[in-house]
Image (tube, grey):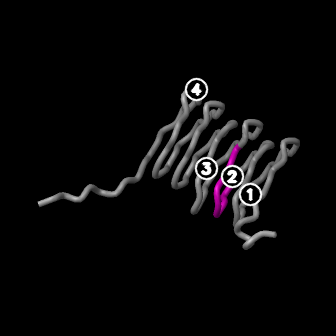
Amino acid sequence: MFKSKTTLTTIVGESSIISGDINSKSSIRIEGIIHGNVNAKGGILITETGEVYGDITSDSGNIAVHGIHVGNIKCKALAISKTGNVKGFIDIDSINVENGAIVNSSIKMEMEEPKIKK
């Protein structure tokens, strides 16, 4: 059914409220509420009904926020949809923010140093 264990997705259902940290070796889809930090080897998706109050980190994947996130974010690429509401420090390589999104954050983007042509 699945090619490997890393393709499995952890789902926090809409009716779920979790207090505590979550660590996953795969991706996570959050439809409910989490009061705690979330760390995933894969991507993290916070749906329109999802809320996370804590830091979120994606080691090798992307993070998409369609719901509410209050806390720090660290990932390679972040997408915030028009329904997204983000507050906290963001440490990323790239970002995409749709018109209508609410972002009250400081952003740090790491970029490669430009090569000087001689």
Q: Looking at the image, do the residues carrying marks 2 and 1 touch, with CB atoms under 8 Å apart?
A: yes
The amino acid marked with disc number 4 is Gly
What residue is at 77 percent from the left and 69 percent from the top? Answer: 2
Q: Nearer the viewer, mark 3 or mark 2?
A: 3
The amino acid sitting under disc 1 is: Ile
Residue labelled with disc 1: 22
**Residue type highlighted by circle 3:** Ile
Q: Earlier in the sequence, mark 2 or mark 4?
A: 2
- Residue at the spot of label 2: 37
Q: How far is disc 4 from disc 3 in space, using C-alphas?
A: 18 Å
From mark 3 to mark 1, how far is it between C-alphas? Answer: 15 Å
| Amino acid residing under circle 2 | Asn
Q: Residue furthest top?
A: 100
Q: Earlier in the sequence, mark 3 or mark 2?
A: 2
Q: Which residue is mark 4?
A: 100
In the rendered image, the quadrant that contains the N terminus is: bottom right
Between 71 and 83, the one nearer to me in the picture: 83
Name the residue tied to disc 3: 63
| Inter-mark Cα distance, 1 to 4 | 29 Å
Residue at image coords 67%, 38%:
66
Picture coordinates of residue 95, whole percent (x, y): 49, 44
Q: Secondary structure at mark 2?
A: loop
Do the numbered discs 1 and 4 sit on residues whose CB atoms are within 8 Å? no
In the figure, 107 relative to 110: above or below? above
Q: Give the magenta part as a residue range.
A: 38-46
- Give the structural element (helix, strand or loop) at label 1: strand
Instruction: State the image coordinates of residue 44 (x, y, percent, origin top left).
Output: 66, 52
